[in-house]
Image (cartoon, grey):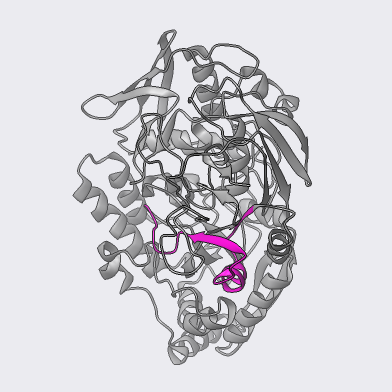
Amino acid sequence: MVYDFNRRQFLSITAGAIFLSTVAAACGGTAGPDTGSEGNEVSGRSSDEPKRGGTLKIGLESDFNSFAPPTGQFDPAGLIYASTVFDTLMALDAEGKAQPNLAESMTPNDDHTEFTMKLRSGIKFHDGTPLTSAEAVNALTAVQTAALTGTSLLNLDTVKATDDLTIVMTTKTSWPAFPTYLCGQLGYVPHPDTIATPEGGLAPIGTGPFVFEEWVQGSHFYATANAEYWQEGLPYVDRVEYTTISDSTSRENSLLAGTIDLMHSSDSINQRNLKGNDQVQYLTDQDNQVGEPSMNMIMINCKAPVVSDLRIRQALAYGFDNATYQEVQNFGLYEPAYGLFPGNPDYAESEKLYPRYDPEKAKSLVKEYEAEHGKASISYSTTNTARQGQVAQLLQQQFEAIGISLEIKQMEQVQLITEALMGNYQLAGWRSFNAPDPDANYVWWSSHTSAPIGESAVNFARHEDPETQAALDKGRTSLDEADRLAAYQKVNERFALDLPYIFTSRTVWGLYAAKKVENFNGRNLPDGAEALSYFGGTFSAASTWLNA
């Protein structure tokens, strides 16, 4: 398969404008709802009669740059912000399958190269403008042609409206996973004014459950209930107030002090501190991951000096004591990971190829490298927080024990993303890959989205491997689920052998809520079926209510 790919399309990608958040690896019920388990761990779904009114106050780990999907930094916090004012064309059900949302139906042809979408009638934007296929085509075309989001839609060919509520989309190859792409950033339908100019992304207009009120970047975002929302009965609260609290401990303290009602976190320190605390409810996705989880990892630049040598990557993998790392950094709450799909029995065989801790073998590989090239000295880039500094120091100790000198470089998150985009790093602390279908990670793993150091590329590891590429193409185009599984088993195998990533653990996302918060994991699809409410650190404020 050949894609018409032009590396220059990446050059205008701005720092941080990626649908992931970067962090070094480190990371319900009240009176009435089913708690789902013992203690303060809850299901987050309630069968009680919803209560209306009040203000829901939420603490998020980050802010972002724009609500406009073609240019927005839609990390987990950004997706939560966007889902407040926008709706997606499709939405994930409880099994992680794409189902109609703004769309009434989405029907593929036999080989999944053409998809016909019918929109629901009677839906209006917040300014009263009716939603038609013209606005949806405008939104899809904008993300298809944007420097940032277009990289995920290289396989999308044409998007055309055939009447006021019908859209026909064609793809360059069979693409059975394509509907899942319309469940997130690529599937939001903002008012045309929101994406027409940079200023439009600062005051968004959508069809969503809440109407934009105020946004002070780096501080807060407020929105009020959409009284004419097309999903009858929603939302339940009158107002939502989001506050950016980047430090996880500060976010936790705000929850305990009552200044926020709900928070999300992927930091194990919050799970350690709040598990068993009867002041709060908590819910994690630790034992309930749909699809492929977000992974904590040490990302390796396969084109950078020293680490471009496979022996050094192998030495790093053999020299990394993950069991000790989990005990020290994650308090024993997480299991070590040795591949992309930890805990999934379908991938157990491919995980066996991944190196386990063997310091003597690591030292031997380092000595072999040094006999040819001299001392192995590399750098590790991570975010500028105390927690990530601790992570870096532990890695420094482990790698220096096998003979590799490690320099620690801490920086702001936006700079770290810039360095990764341009390939100006050797090792980096990273979190990524959360996807209901592995094909959604094609953009991060494909040789087509790599580039030389100094050129922008979203294959941050710059791992180029014909066998991995062939497997990705098979996983994308096959209509046979067994073939697709075999393809991603092959990807897992190739990563274990080539080592563009040293995995630490899967990311565990937690929601932590005051006792008065109900149904924060209770979103349903328009037809009433259960939706995948809590996925990758995101949730729906529309389905949440307050009982006090």
| In the image, residue 278 lies in the stretch drawn in magenta | yes
Q: Is residue 148 above or below residue 535?
A: above
Q: Residue at x 72, y 69 (%)?
A: 409
**Could you tell me if residue 452 is visible in this image?**
yes
Q: Position of residue 156 (x, y in %)?
A: 41, 29
Against 54, is 189 above or below?
A: above
* Residue 128 picture location, percent across and down: 62, 12
Bounds of the magenta segment: 262-290
Quarter of the N terminus within the rendering: top left
> Residue drawn 34% across and 23% down?
105
Q: Which quarter of the picture shows residue 166?
A: top left
Q: Residue at x 57, y 29 (%)?
A: 209
32 in the magenta segment: no
Residue 470 percent location from the top left of the image: 31, 49
Question: Which quadrant of the view contains residue 430?
Answer: bottom right
View extreme (bottom): residue? 360
Report the front residue among 509 and 176: 509
Q: In the rendered view, tell whether residue 278 sits above or below residue 246.
A: below
Query: For this rendering, which residue is in front, 243 or 465?
Result: 243
Depth order, front residue of 140/421: 140
